[in-house]
Image (tube, coloured by chain):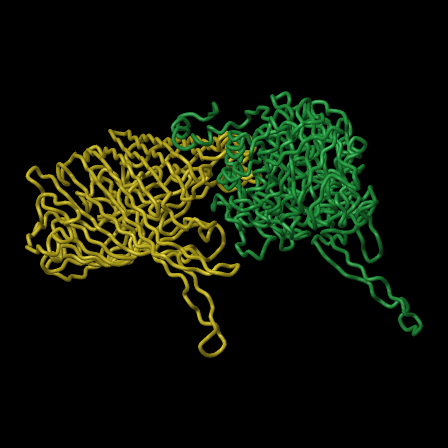
Chain colours: A green, B yellow
Amino acid sequence: MTKRAPLFALLLSACVGGEAADVPIGEVATHVDDWRDEVMYQLMVDRFANGSAANDWRVNHDDQVLTAYKGGDWQGVIDRLDYLEELGVTALWISPIVRNVDTDAGIDGYHGYWAVDLEKVNPHFGDLATLRRMVEECHARNIKVVLDIVTNHLGQVFYYDINMNGTPDISIAGGYPVNPGDPGAGSRTPVTQITEYDPDYDARGVQSLTSLGEAGPAPIRFFDMPEIFRVPPQPEIFQRREAYNLRGRVIDWNDREQVVHGDFPGGLKDIDTTNPTVRSELIRVYSDWVLKLDLDGFRIDTVKHVEHEFWQVFARDVRARLAAAGKDRFLMFGEAFDGDDALVGSYTRPGELDSVFYFPQKFQVFDDVFANGGATSKIADLHAQRPINYGTEIQPGGIGIAPHRALVNFIDNHDVPRFLWRQPDTRALRAAMGFLMFEEGIPCLYYGTEQDFSGGNDPANREPLWWSDYATDGETFRWAARLIRVRKRYDALRRGEMRFTWTSDRTGDEEDAGVVAFERTEGEAYALVVINAQGNHPSATVFEGAAMAVGVPAGTVLADALTGDRFTVEPDGTVDVPVDAFQVRALVREAEYEAF
Amino acid sequence: MRWTGYPIGALLALALVTHVDAQALDDEFTEPTVEPADDADAPVDPATGSAPAAVSDPAAVSEDELPPTSGPRADNAPMAEIEVAETDARADGFRSGFAFGSYGRVAVASNLDGGLGRDADIVAFAPRIDEDVYFELELRRQDQLRGGARSFVVATVAFGGPLFHLDGDFDESIAVRNLFAMVTDAFTDGLSLWAGSRMWRGDDVYLLNFWPLDNLNTVGGGLDYSFLPGAHGDMLELRLVGGLARPNDPFHRQVTGAIPTAGFVPDDVVLLDRPRFTAGLKATFWPAGRQARSGLKAILYGEGHFLPDGERELEGGGTETLPRDEGYVLGAQLGGYIADSNTFANLFVKYASGLAVYDPFAVPFTTGSVLRTSRAKELVVALSANYEVGAFGLQLGAYYRWFRDADPNVFDRHSLAEGAIDVRPHVWFGDMAGLSLDLSYQALQASALDETTGQVVRGGITKIGIIPFISPFGRGTYTRPHIRLIYSLTIRDEDAQRLYSDDDPRSQQALEHYLGIGAEWWFDSSSYGS
């Protein structure tokens, strides 16, 4: 209760505000010991669970429509924590929480990436107290919460008034004969479309255009449509021209200048993150959310569209502010949607982020190998690049783990088709899940994977989870839960260093085709993972008489934590481990074996 | 006949239809109310259950003494002399004929910053010092019939501001508030029956413009029955009302176009049609009778609300079933009064559950699939009092309200506690002029957190008002009309400022002025009481 509230305030507080007053806004603590111990679960709030009908505004219940709000909210997350606990995940990555442009061009901002007010919550998902209570309930179950944030752009909050007529236009021009009346003139002027919502990139900045030609930088005009939250953005700095790069939409994704300074397609206005005021405001508003909600990490959207210097300042200042409040080991990992391993890794340079979303692995391992049957040698090849392309130094004030050992691994996510859309064989998915859970780094499971969801490109890959009835008896759900239990049980599978012991270039009928095997060692802790990534035939860790050498002494008996099968290390230090099609084995010392 | 003793309310209807042993008690006629009212506005003397009917005599605020023998009703509302029965003027002053009455208030004010003054409230029932324009015009035909019965036909038209002379819009908001016929003492003395559209109300908290208990607006009918006085002069009255309301909104009614049976113009098809039935029962007990110069009054009150199920089409296709719903109100009131000094105090307690928490004209839900109100709860405690001595008077109004809406959210800006207290002392200068101070505080607290501060959503407003007034009909807190000069200073705390949108200037204003002139009157109006 504030000092300003006399008289009735005590009575009021006792009778209705009690629940809200008990929400510990501003109290934070460190909830993580080692992020590699965590199993992350990415959920889109709008699609996970609908816990409160009170915020079902603009909800479309038609199952065929996936571009609209579907009703999920933070109360729904609270309501389904038993489900998540049974699955075994220990960290939730939730989609953005801030107020968005509600709808644009017939598509709703249910995903959260169209921010309009960075200091207010999106009312479709609930209110601040419910969100804080959600975090609190998660922490009570030892589940951490990672917030998805965007610093690169806002939603489509203004348009470029290219023709300076004060209204947003889309015009098509051209196609006229170059020389009317000349029968020989076949060429015509090019047909061009100019949209003031989302014009093409111009390195000079989007130019205004009149019938007489260009007329200088185009004015920008903010929308004023409060009924859809499409209003001048907040904080106030974002109502000024200097807060944006104003160069129009990226059209050449290989041009770094465009990628960094261009608008994101869809008219998402690129923020000038070199502006000191902009930087300080982004640091303030996002670290404020951490302090209000006791969050445990940021997943940061579109990091490759922002200059490195920003990340150096943002990461440093956020860490410092949180540490001062008592929160350490705050995870910041970035999304660079790119297969370029060096580019993705560059955001983990000293002083930048703790980790990144490991897109190169998604493309080269989960797609190429597990979904498409490629050679498992690719896996080791890519892994060998980790210490080269990713930071090997612990970030000052960061999570305490070098980035190359704490990459956030994933099979699929909300921006790519689900694994089962590419490869409908659920055995392949389960093999991929085995690799995800037992490899080095932080595993991240996209919601619905455990329910065999198979949606294609966005938005088909954003199915409401309630379509599954939250079943916990499905084979994939039970498999995921089992893998997670095994991972939690063995230190080596969580924190152990990863060393490949067998991969193969062979993808046909060969005896080791599809085999990938690796050891995880952490001190005395040891595990040997053997996976057959192809589904045509059983394979083994042998080829033409050569067997797999391992790092434990001869005579060591290894037990498969998933089947109970025993394998003894031969006197020459090798072990032959057969694996059925798409089988996953996690071998541990027999003495440590527990049936799961 | 009229019953003596106090059978429980449930036996009332049976008793009324099975015992018609006439027993005239002409000197105890229950006067059809002569009370000012509006949609939530009319002042009622809470001690007595009815409004003072434009009286200049402070002692005349008791309904037991209505109609007044002085004041505007007698002086200002002459009736047409149309005789129906053998008598046209009874001992109580009743006169057959047409009668006209009115309640109204009108004001215009400046905010001393170039704009109009406006109300600056954050709670549901706020101090009325800066309230809006509203007035009623009531035309009534009343007749004394043979055998002692009387009949009434009442039509009340209400107008809401702003007025044409303010906004230039030649189109005021008009509503028919009363349109009913009533007969009293027709079958048995003490029994009144009515049917039609009617405001049905009890006592109010004048300073807050608030009816804590009975406040129904319905189309239906009802009956009142006054039992014979008991051995000690004690009296019991029972009132029963029932009626329907079906607002024209998608929660209650949906009409869609269909391929015409002939021609080209689509037929209208009513898909959803769910009127709410509301029934109210009120028992009022006067231990010392209704005629006592001082005494007590105790009221028990209940309502039942019932809404049938229905099915409506959704915009995106498909249909949605709206389930049956219901709710109830339980309430009580305890009052005491001293008529000679125009002094009274009334304490109200009301608990509502389910559908009854929401006004029959309201849509309980604007979103979502939770379509029953069973979770909704409301508790109201209110106090109204008046004290007058010599040239001084003191009015008090206060309430506390705890409200939990129907959705299951623990945190919700719609779930709140609020309250207000308003104290208005008066001093008279002679018999026709006076000065009032109006000191009030209102506050609310919601079950939600402010996103900017992380603190509980709350706010408080203090108002300090000065009201010099002229009262042509003399002294008395409830004497009207009043012609007033009004100044009010609103002081918002920082939390109250945050209740407004960032774009609203009030989100930045700690102080707001209201300086205006206005008038309020009532006479022979608003037949909603007993």
Nearer-the-camera pick, A456 or A485: A485
The quarter of the displayed image where residue B255 is located = bottom left
**Toward the viewer: A241 or A481?**
A481
Residue A278 visible to an observer of this rendering: no
Viewer-proximal residue, B208 or B439?
A: B208
| Up/down of A486 relative to B526, above or below | above
Q: In this image, A11 relative to A241: left or right?
A: left
Q: On screen, B424 above or below A268?
A: above
Number of marks in the rendered image: 0
Closer-to-camera residue (A287/A546) = A546
Q: Residue at x 30, y 39 (%)?
A: B351
Query: What is the x, y in percent for residue B8?
Result: 15, 45
Q: Position of residue B462 (x, y in %)?
A: 43, 30
| Quarter location, residue A480 | top right
Q: Residue furthest front?
A: A571
Residue A51 image offset from top left, x and y in percent? 48, 43
Residue B473 spot, x, y in % from top left: 27, 41
In the displayed structure, does residue A525 sit left or right of residue B501? right
Can residue B329 be spotted in the picture?
yes
Q: Is residue A410 above or below residue A318?
A: below
